Amino acid sequence: MKSSGRSEASPPRSRGYLRQYELVERVLAYQPDADEEALNKAYVFTTLRHGQQLRHSGDPYYAHPVAVAGLLTELKMDQATIIAGLLHDTVEDTDATVEDIRRLFGDAVADLVDGVTKLPKLSGDGPRQKQAENFQKFILATTRDIRVLIVKLADRLHNMRTIEFMPRQESRLRIARETIDIYAPLARRVGLSIYATELEDHAFRIINPEAYEAIVLRLDELLSDDRATVARIHSDIENVMRQRGVAGELYGRMKRPYSIWRKLETKSISFKDLGDVFAYRLIVSSVDECYRALAAAHQQWAVLSERFKDYISVPKPNGYRSLHTTFLGPGNRRVELQIRTAEMNAIAERGVAAHWTYKNSRYGFDAEAARAVGIDAEAELTAFADMLTHGAEPEEFLEHAKLQMYRDSVFVFTPKGKLVKLPAGSTPLDFAYAVHSEIGDSTVGARINNVERPLRTALENGDVVEILRGPAPAAHANWEGLAVTGRARSAIRRLTRSAERGEFIAIGSRLIDHALRRIGLEPSEVSRPEMAERAGFDRFEALSEAVGRGRLSTADLLSVAFPGRDDPARQQGSVEADPAPLLVAGDGLTPGVTLHLAECCSPLPGDRIVGLLAPERGIEVHVIDCARLGEHEEASETWIDLRWKPREAAGGDVLAVGRIHVTTANRRGALAVLFKAVSDAQGNIINIKTLKRSVDFFDFEFDIEVEDSRRLTQIVAAIRALSVVDRAERIRG
Ligand code: MN
């Protein structure tokens, strides 16, 4: 038994670039009858044409096409593809023309270079319509010759390997997004999983450097804690195989950062629930040997049977074949082992590209062999193109296409036995909307194979799904995340939007009532339509929605709708009539002195406080660690000792106002969830200020009426516990 610790996922990276003779030798190694002269000519052509052009890295430009050609030799692509790799940028970036190339290198190479040059630029942003059209053209172009796609993917891979040299962060981000949204899924679609994996990891590092670093760091820690165990498992597996007469080569490999991150993100599980981050792969010589190796492992160790998969007898739709087993290995450690032949491994890693070989004494794509193992990438791309061409809305196809690329399908049944095809990972909600939107809208639960299961359950092949329906359409704010299909998600979005609007209207209406009482008006005696009109809204609902969403503050509303009225919030910079005189006591306070709670730190009963004598403003009450106090440190004579009065002395239910800063995910319904949590924790939100709303986050400040600081602490804790909340903190100056 041979052993190797190399990971197949990180191909060799050389400094410097591939020399002309090295490239030619590499091709000759697998295609001995390749046209050496043509390869040499192409190498010289690209270096001359790109001439003095430089990459952002400072390397000569031709280092890039040479590297792309080098990547293509690792895939053992035919000579025409290697030459196309060398020339792929000459038409776009130099004065060479397709006709020059046709004359010098023939039709096959010229058509490939032309194909790569004319591929539309794909991008993950810009108008959806445009994106979708370009994607459609792209797919159509690559359908004619899959090699065009392979060259394009190698081009992208090299660009991602060198992306740190891109000078502008925006460009790096844009390219990384395209890569993760479009190129990596395309690579996966044609089975080029080593490209897909590496593209994803590079893009992930650019898009989310903190998460990437955190995962890599954690992996390093785990590995260094674990080195001895990993080595022991490795040698135990080897020994068992040797004893039972199985010959093969064992590889250990670390799971990839991006795939770990996706699991952490989509399944909301923690690092330790991921199981072992190390996995093993045994490469043997034949299908028989695969099963003998499997038997050897199963005779030695206890199998976790639910994780056993035989993709040899039932290959995945993309042609992937392998045995997967997980057992309790040495020290009761969960060990994941994949067993496959070298041929299966080549297909698992390189997919469609694994099929360039000699057939009838010609080196080329062996379509028959590819189809025999279930790979028909060209047919798949054609089906794709068909789908894109015959449709009303290109955008829908883009969404569909992205989904279809990411996931294989899952087939499930209605209780009456009707087959429903969904993307894998679909939940009962996707199923419900796929059957009928009315069913989706009124879903309250699901039974899968006669057992009631949570709506987040991922459906599996063959499941019989029965939807439990409520009397009326109702969607929960968080349900959108429970669906994967565009159809279900947009329906849920529509439904929550209308439900959510109702909630904001109710919240706003409460805030308005509260504000009216503050200026001495009884809400029932105020005409709502008139008030709305004075504030510039045609209906009261629109006004209260604006207030509820924090787009209009109650103070602004009062000042336009009731301009003559005194609003204590305006005068004192606090939203509520200042309760300071009722709450705060101090020795040597002059009776009748103006006393108010500072807005910067909003002191609450229970906080340690100090008074600051401010010219013309009386005494401001601050919390002792208010940042503003620093400005007055020198003038210690203006500081006054203060304390809170006991509650009863303050007259029982006097409330003060605390201010908190909350960052939530910018998700529909987040604010409504937050309001509910605050009121459940017995706080009363009296004002909202939206600070920032970005694609991902929503930042606001809340003023909350509470009796003391302990209550506010409880409220902040309750808010932090919400899954939509990223950060919540009390503001103290
Ligand atoms: Mn290029």
Image (cartoon, grey):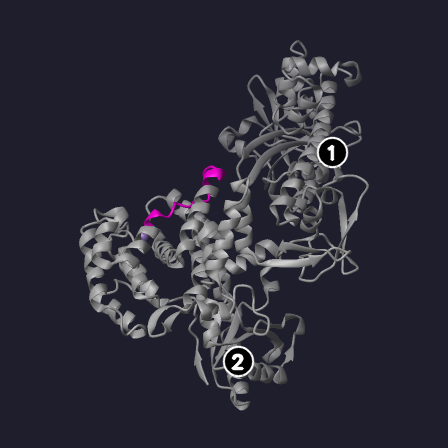
Residue at coordinates 76% horizontally, 61% vertically from top-left?
449
Residue visible at 53% across and 49% down?
Answer: 387
Q: Position of residue 502 (x, y in %)?
A: 72, 31
Q: Is residue 554 visible?
A: yes
Between 240 and 418, the residue placed more toward the observer is 418
Residue 627 is situated, as x and y percent measured from the top left of the image, at 53, 34
Identify which residue is drawn at 69% across, 44% down.
718
Q: Is 692 located above or below residue 617 in the figure?
A: below
Q: Amino acid at mark 1?
A: Glu
Task: Please provide percent x and percent y for residue 346.
Answer: 44, 71
Q: Which residue is mark 1?
A: 707
Q: Is residue 401 magenta?
A: no
In this view of the protein, which residue sits in the foreground, 681 or 459? 459
The relative height of residue 482 versus residue 151 in the rendered view (above or below) is above
Could you say whether the residue bearing mark 2 is in a helix, strand or loop? helix
Q: Quadrant of residue 442?
A: top right
- Identify residue type, mark 2: Val
Is residue 59 visible from the viewing direction of this image?
no
Q: Which residue is mark 2?
A: 287
Q: Splitting the image into 4 quarters, where does residue 608 fall?
A: top right
User: Against 705, is 26 above or below?
Assistant: below
Quarter of the picture containing the C terminus is top right
Taking 248 as reference, is 52 left or right?
left
Query: Which segment is the magenta one?
Result: 117-131
The spot of residue 226 in percent (x, y) is 52, 72
- Judged left or right of residue 440, residue 629 is left
Quarter of the rendering containing residue 618? top right
